[in-house]
Amino acid sequence: MDANRARFPADEGPCRGPVLPRSDDEVRPDTSDGEHMSQRLTTPMVREDGILREATWEEALQRAADGFRSVVDAHGPTAFGMFSCSKTTNEVNYAAQRFTRRVIGSNNIDSCNRT
């Protein structure tokens, strides 16, 4: 096994389950009737001391940028990876790969086209 690969116990990190749903049906199973529309988030959420709270867009985006920066600073750009989706537009996928390659400096980008 490669010594530079991240290892996580089964109950930590990415092993805790999927980061995002695999299909629109998991995100919006009932959009035709709008029954659960009131349950959708309308503001960003950030975790503070293990508890989610509402935040401004500026704070949420800054936290995401700081998180990306801390990983790259601590472990180098190849520690960062991007997973894009085949259900989105070519333009969004292009922007994701450009961001990963040009801003972060990593070629670690994949998509569910292959899965």
Image: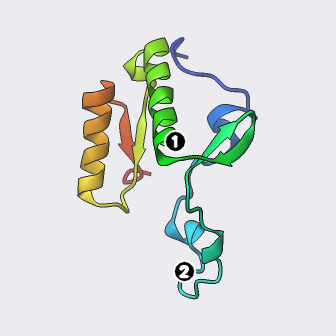
> Which residue is at 51% across, 64% downward?
23
Q: Secondary structure at mark 1?
A: helix
Dividing the picture into quadrants, the one containing residue 78 is top left
Along the horizontal axis of the image, is 88 left or right of 13?
Answer: left
Residue 56 versus residue 26 in the image, above or below: above
Mark 2, Cα crowd under 10 Å, few <14 / some 14-19 / many 20+, is: few
Q: Position of residue 103 (x, y in %)?
A: 29, 29
Q: Amino acid at mark 1?
A: Ala
In the image, 47 versus 12, the foreground residue is 47
Residue 27 versus residue 58 in the image, above or below: below
- Answer whether residue 106 is visible to the viewer in this image: no
Q: Position of residue 110 (x, y in %)?
A: 37, 42
Q: Which residue is mark 1?
A: 60
- Which residue, as the protein is rendered here, is positioned at the far bottom? 33
Q: Secondary structure at mark 2?
A: loop
Q: Amino acid at mark 2?
A: Thr
Q: Position of residue 73 (x, y in %)?
A: 44, 14
Cα gap from disc 2 to disc 1, whole angstroms: 26 Å
